[in-house]
Amino acid sequence: MSFDYLLEKIASARFETTPFRHIYLKEVFEGEHFSEIVCAPEILIPAADSDERLFDSLFDRNYQIIEFPGCITDRKLYMKWHKDRNSTRVMNNTACEGFGMTVRLAKPRSSIIEKIFDFMHTEQFQAALADKFEVDRHRVTYDAGIQKYLDGYEISPHPDIRSKALTYMININPGPQSEDRDHHTHYLRFRDEYKYVETFWEGHPNHERGWVPWNWCDTVKIQRENNSMVIFSPSNSTLHGVRARYDHLMFQRTQMYGNLWYKDVKLEMIPRWEDYLIGGNSHREPLSLRGKVKAAIPTGVKQFIRKVRQDDHLVTDRLRQIGLK
């Protein structure tokens, strides 16, 4: 069994530019391969009648709870929150309203999953990804696996941290009508009144990029299709997020997921989304008047804008377009 056809699909794929530069592949795996993958016992977990039974089934199939953005690792605390979402405070980024739990397959059992595991870690597959996005493989490390994301999993819009050189996600959801469920990745762009945040990231490469509230952005595309793959190299515009609201006792949101990581990223500051707030407005009350935006820009951002005017005509033009100058 060979998955080498994936190498050609990646190499020949055309880049899409909306809402940012990325590759979107449909029907990634050949039909017979995909059917075997989603029917494998590690992927198709029997329906459970409780969270406790679901965790038992996951652990029996070699899944392990992992630390992951938008999630906690305390199973009991998660089940308590999942039983009554108002009973426990949200232990997540303050831009979110919930949290979930992610489990990763530690060791495959079935032949098909073992083979795809091996392929995901081949030099050829890593090279295909890096070469397509012109990533210097000497500067990066690689990680990949199969993960399930339980109900409540949420990571608000974010462009990915600067140490991530490339990321890919393949939907291998085993549930019927999974494309209609509310657990898919959103690809977004900033609303006009918040585009200054992206400009700030551009002008401060030593500041980490972070999560922002959902209503600072608009969804442009959702990766609903099963057997689809998205690949992109993070930049200041690669906003994406997930807000999973579905019945995970029937089936679980499941992906093949991998990243290339830079080894040498150094940062001076890690701001929070609250640091970008203008005039004391909360993320639930988005600004709409450009005059208010301009009048309430924080001092640090104003200083940045003045510097941009002096040193970077390209970014100055962008500020003019969004009304901050």
Image (spheres, helix red, strand yellow):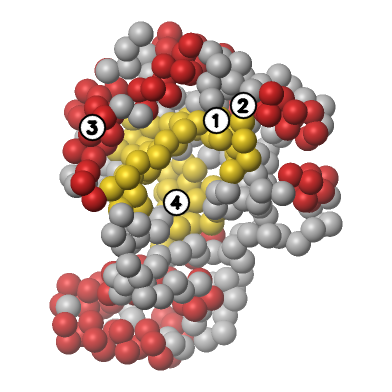
| x, y percent for residue 176 | 61, 21
Label 1, residues with CA under 10 Å away: few <14, some 14-19, many ≥20: some
Which residue: 58% across, 48% down? 67
In the image, 287: left or right of 71? left
- State which tag comes first along the sequence, 2 or 1: 2
Q: Is residue 193 visible?
A: no
- State which tag comes first along the sequence, 4 or 2: 2
| x, y percent for residue 285 | 59, 73
The residue beneath circle 1 is: 106
At label 1, which amino acid type do we have? Ala
| x, y percent for residue 111 | 48, 11
Q: Which element is circle 3 on? A: helix
- State which tag comes first along the sequence, 3 or 1: 1
- Foreground mark, 3 or 4, reads 3
User: Any mark on residue 240, and which?
Assistant: 4
Q: Which element is circle 1 on? A: loop
Which residue: 53% across, 39% down? 184
Label 2, residues with CA under 10 Å away: few <14, some 14-19, many ≥20: some
| Placement of 32 over or under 71, stated as above or below | above
Marks 2 and 1 close (CB-CB < 8 Å): yes
The residue beneath circle 3 is: 128
User: Any mark on residue 62, and which?
Assistant: 2
- Foreground mark, 1 or 4, reads 1
- State which tag comes first along the sequence, 3 or 4: 3
Q: Which element is circle 4 on? A: strand
Considering depth in this image, is 94 or 163 the residue closer to the camera? Answer: 163
